[in-house]
Amino acid sequence: MATQNAKVRQRGSSLVEFMVASLLGLIALGIVGNVFISGKKAATERSKELLLLQNMTSVMQQMKEDLLRAGYNGVTAGSSILSGAAYAIHTQTDPEMLGFVYRVASSGSSAYRSVIYKYKPLSPRANLIQLCEKHYHKPLTPASAAKSGFQGVCYNLFDPKQITIDSFNVSTIETVSNSISSAFSVISMSASLVNDASVTHSMVIKVQQRNW
């Protein structure tokens, strides 16, 4: 009889242990599942941030490298300036735009490269930055350089299905030191993802004009 009771108690203990083990297993699975979901969500958010950051960094670096060429002549005295502009780097507002020209050949029908970076607002969640580049035998006016179809085209610097430009501001500041005048340009840009406005980033670059 004592042996039978011991066996009954043993079976009961095994069942309780199994239930406890199952419960602990479910808890562990739940914790692992939450960690996995949280990690996947964090990775997704990080990939969105990297997409925006990499695109903005690439465009701003392109602008900076282009701006360092602004005004280059190499053939005659003085800087190359867009027709009607006051500075080697021309800026204007409404819409925001910056432009410049530099010589790429000593002569010929494509001796000058006129460049315009312009902000093109379309809707609250679909604003663009476009690059217009034209090759011509002389510097163009800012208005002519900014139009697509004459000696060149304008194209988007960001994929409009992925990135929208929230703000684009440009300015040129003239400086005088020891009777030598120069200028530097300040370009600021803020952008966000079209499908996730919470993912945003802002960048600012300052470029000293070299060919003044």
Image (tube, rainbow, N blue to C red):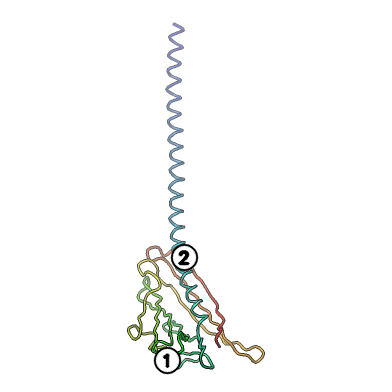
- Asked if 46 appears above or below 171 in the picture, the reply is above
Q: Three-letter amino acid code at disc 1?
A: Lys
Instruction: Identify the residue at the far left of this view.
Output: 149
| Nearer to the camera, 28 or 98 | 98
Can you say whether 90 is above or below 192 in the image? Answer: below
Where is residue 9? Give x, y as percent: 45, 15
Circle 1: is it few (<14), some (14-19), or many (20+) Cα within 10 Å?
A: many
Which residue sits furthest right?
Answer: 178
Please say if 37 is above or below 73: above
Image coordinates for residue 8, horizontal then vertical, percent: 42, 14
Q: Element at badge 1?
A: loop
Q: Amino acid at mark 2?
A: Gln
Name the residue located 46 percent from the left edge and 77 percent from the top edge: 168
Q: Residues within 10 Å of mark 2 (few under 14, many from 20)?
A: few
Q: Quadrant of the C terminus?
A: bottom right
Determine the residue positioned at 56% across, 84% down.
210
Q: Secondary structure at mark 2?
A: helix
